[in-house]
Amino acid sequence: MENVKNFLKKAADADFLFMKAVMIIALHGACRAEELRLLKVDDVEDSGLTSENGINGIELYRKYLNLRPKHVDHRRLLIYYKSGKCTVQPVGINTLYSIPKKIAACLGLPKPNSFTGHCFRRTSATFLADSEADIQVLKRHDGWRSSGVAEAYVEDSIENKAVVISAFFLFAGACRSDELINMVLEDISDTGDILVLQIPDSKTNIKRTFTITNEILNGVSILDMYRKYLDCRSPKTCHSRFFVTYVKGKCTNQVIGKNTIAKIPYRIAIFLNLDDSKGYTGHSFRLTSATLLVNAGSDILTLKKHGGWRTNAVAEGTSSTTTTLENNKQEPISTSRANISSRGISISNLTNCTIHFNNI
């Protein structure tokens, strides 16, 4: 959603007004390229309403429509646009397929050629699934006959929430994969404003406690995401392990294993189209957490407490390693924006560490 907003706000209308109009229609209607190509002026009814959230997509559409020449011998809605003017020629299918690539290039996204003509439709379905729409709503919205595709989007939405929650736990608490898979419901306390997490059985048998504050990321509350994932848990679950697998819209009794947790940095790297995604290992979050702590000016004792290391040598080795990883293929993942100010970390004392995710 952030990329969509950036494009609509920042891309110059003189060059991209046509693409903005296509994006607005395609995302709202989950349109196929052929459906967009055949769309006629009479198929669109303007009710006179305006949109909110600082981006008036309706006004962008009207601006494009008002540039339509008066004498056009067809009713096709989408016509070519160049240098602030519309021609009379209707847009072809190949032009519509190329729009996501051009938008990705305009935004400076990695691998813009990987953004195909299906991107708008998939993005529309993803937005709907992430807003807690059920399978029947997705089917009607996208025009799917069977439930299989809709189920996949709903499943991915919940699974991605589990990935994000796991990532925050790994990152905020400098958690090892073993610590995360062994985490039980009783280790997490929801106070309403923060999550308090305890790691009682770490590799070094050093009990650690950390907190996660309620930050809003792209309009989504971290604590709400945690609670929604928790609500998907079956009441018949016969164990107290927190992370369980999710299949076809429901959480199962099966716990998430170490390999699944260890692949989270890799999956995030794939999502972000980062180079050499296989180089992002299960240690990436723990190393990144240590790196940010060192960059914030913390001493070796604080670093030992934060990561649960017994000796100075290991902590020093970690801080030394993480500084060199900036130019290494195993560069630690920070966030989707890859920019975290050291001011976003505050140490409450030498026992507990509070991580604030600011403006992620």
Image (cartoon, rainbow, N blue to C red):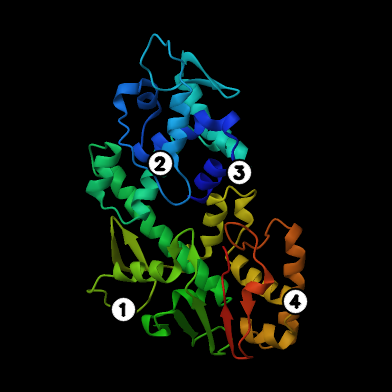
Provide the residue designation for mark 2.
122
Q: How far apart, in angstroms, are the residues tagged by discs 1 and 4? A: 37 Å
Q: Give the percent coordinates (x, y) of residue 192.
A: 39, 80
- What is the three-letter code of the residue carrying label 4? Gly
Provide the residue designation for mark 1.
239
Provide the residue designation for mark 4.
317
- What is the three-letter code of the residue carrying label 1? His
Q: Give the percent coordinates (x, y) of residue 24.
A: 43, 37
Mark 1 or mark 4: whose residue is earlier in sequence: 1
Quarter in which the C terminus is drawn: bottom right
Mark 3 or mark 1: whose residue is earlier in sequence: 3
Mark 3 or mark 4: whose residue is earlier in sequence: 3
Badge 1 vs badge 4, beta-carbon distance below 8 Å: no
**Mark 1, residues whose alpha carbon is within 10 Å: few (<14), some, or many (≥20)?**
few
Q: Secondary structure at mark 4?
A: helix
Q: Is residue 22 visible?
A: no
Provide the residue designation for mark 3.
109
Badge 3 vs badge 4, beta-carbon distance below 8 Å: no
Mark 2 or mark 3: whose residue is earlier in sequence: 3
Residue 27 picture quarter: top left
Q: How far apart, in angstroms, are the residues tagged by discs 3 and 4? A: 34 Å
Residue 229 picture quarter: bottom left
Q: Nearer the viewer, residue 53 or 93?
A: 53
Q: Is residue 175 above or below residue 199?
A: above
Badge 3 vs badge 1, beta-carbon distance below 8 Å: no
